[in-house]
Amino acid sequence: DIVALLALAAATVFGAVPFDQVYTGLSNNAVVTVACVMVISTAITESGILTRVVSKLDLIAASPTLHIGALSLLTAILSAFMNNVGALTLMMPIAIKTAISNKRSPSLVLMPLALASAMGGLATMIGTPPNLLISSFRQSALGESYSLFDFSFVGIWVGLLGVVFVSLVGW
């Protein structure tokens, strides 16, 4: 965020971005959605709900395959409905805590988590910023945006196969 704001400031100072248009990009639906998701993720993390989730996941975390599979599946499902960055932000503390409590390196679960987040986001319009941007473009070009589940037929299969892959082979 800081780098992006500094780049915007530099682009404005050097004349690449007109001063009267500095903040026009912040009104884009994708930007607003990502910002809202980050606020919600932080609220959920701070609420203590994660402690309950960690205690439930510790029961199956003895097996690395089940541990990675459960975390990846949960991340993919969350990613479909809240934004892949937000889902990853929410699940990272859980992954790290469960890995450490099972005497496993957190790096073992973090890459599969990132991949599951990206693949789960493919299932809905709000799952990834590109889906939101394409929907916004379609709205401006054709007068009709995509609906929430227009991406699901392909996205669910890609997400499911990806989670199976990272759970069984990819990690």
Image: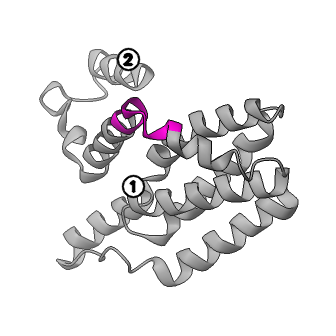
Q: Can residue 154 be seen from the camera position used here?
A: yes
Local secondary structure at mark 2: helix
Write the residue at 28% across / 72% down.
138
**Type of amino acid at the residue the image marks with label 2:** Leu
Q: Which residues are magenta?
A: 43-51
Which disc, if any, is residue 116? none
Name the residue rendered at 49%, 48% in the picture.
Answer: 87
Which residue is rendered at x = 74% and y = 43% of the image? 109
| Amino acid type assigned to the residue bearing label 1 in the image | Met
Q: Compared with residue 65, is residue 32 higher up or lower down, i.e. above or below?
A: above
Is residue 32 shown left or right of residue 77? left
Q: Nearer the viewer, residue 130 or 167?
A: 167
For residue 166, above or below residue 33: below
Image coordinates for residue 85, horizontal then vertical, percent: 48, 45
Q: Quadrant of residue 117?
A: bottom right
Q: Nearer the viewer, residue 66 or 152?
A: 66
Relative placement, left or right, of 158 versus 134 is right
**Hey, which residue is sitting farthest bottom in the picture?**
153
Would you say residue 171 is visible in this rendering? no
Distance from disc 1 to disc 2, alpha carbons, whole Å, reads 27 Å
Q: Which residue is mark 2?
A: 6
**Mark nearer the viewer, 1 or 2:** 1
Residue corresponding to mark 1: 82
Residue closest to the eye, 144 or 8:
144
**Residue density around tag 1, few if under 14, some if 14–19, many if 20 or more, within 10 Å:** many
Q: Position of residue 22 (x, y in %)?
A: 21, 29
Residue 25 lies, in percent from the top left, at 25, 41
Report whether 33 appears left or right of 121: left
Q: Residue at x 35, y 17 (%)?
A: 10
Magenta residues, dominant SS class: helix
